[in-house]
Amino acid sequence: MNKIFILLSLLSSLTIAMPGDAEKPIEIEAESVVVDESTGFNQFMGDAVVTQGSLVLSAELIEVQTSDEEVRSMVAKGSQQKPAKYTQSQPNQARFIEASAIEITYDVEKGIVFLIGDAHLVQGFDSFSGETIEYDINNDKVFVKGSEDGVKRVKFKIAL
């Protein structure tokens, strides 16, 4: 139990976009957890959900990498049938940012969310789809790519 408390304390260092989110408690729910203090690699398995303030990350498996008592990255792994999901309120957006993909990597240090495999992102009233999406939270930028073979093209919908 002490190990989980330590991990939750480390997770409180996440860079969160909404003012006040970083001060909110972190809640993690999963069917099982593996905490490895020697490597800083932690796994939350079975309908895992991480919440802190307005940030919600959910997937069948969520891996959290820590180093020097700080969270470095979080990787949410889903499937084609049940993709990983990310939502968060942004101060410059009228609506929540909503994203889904087979795999979502949140690079905490850089403030970037990487969506890989059947990626979808809704930002305000605009939506993006492609094979991969890179969402720069801090600079409010989106970079979308289609598949390498050209079969899956980029889709962008602007609501005016």
Image: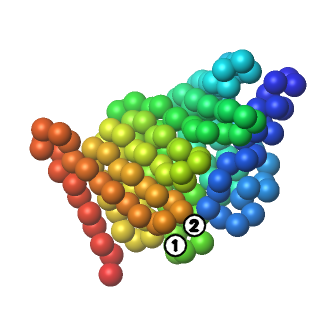
Q: What residue is shown at x 47% (from left), y 31% (from top)?
A: 77
Kind of residue at disc 1: Gln
Q: Please state the horizontal and vertical placement of residue 105, each as a whole percent of the image.
A: 48, 40
Number of callouts in the render?
2
- Which label belongs to residue 90? 2
Looking at the rendering, which quadrant does residue 27 occupy? top right
What is the quadrant of the N terminus in the image?
A: top right
| Residue in front for this viewpoint, 51 or 39 | 39
- Which label belongs to residue 109? none
Q: Residues within 10 Å of mark 1 (few under 14, many from 20)?
A: few
| Residue in front for this viewpoint, 81 or 148 | 148
Mark 1 touching mark 2, by CB under 8 A? yes
In-image side of 10 versus 74 (left or right): right
Task: Please determine whether, in this image, residue 97 is positioned above or below residue 107.
Answer: below
Helix, strand, or loop for circle 1?
A: loop
Does residue 38 appear in this view?
Answer: yes
Q: What residue is shown at x 23% (from left), y 58% (from top)?
A: 155
Kind of residue at disc 2: Gln
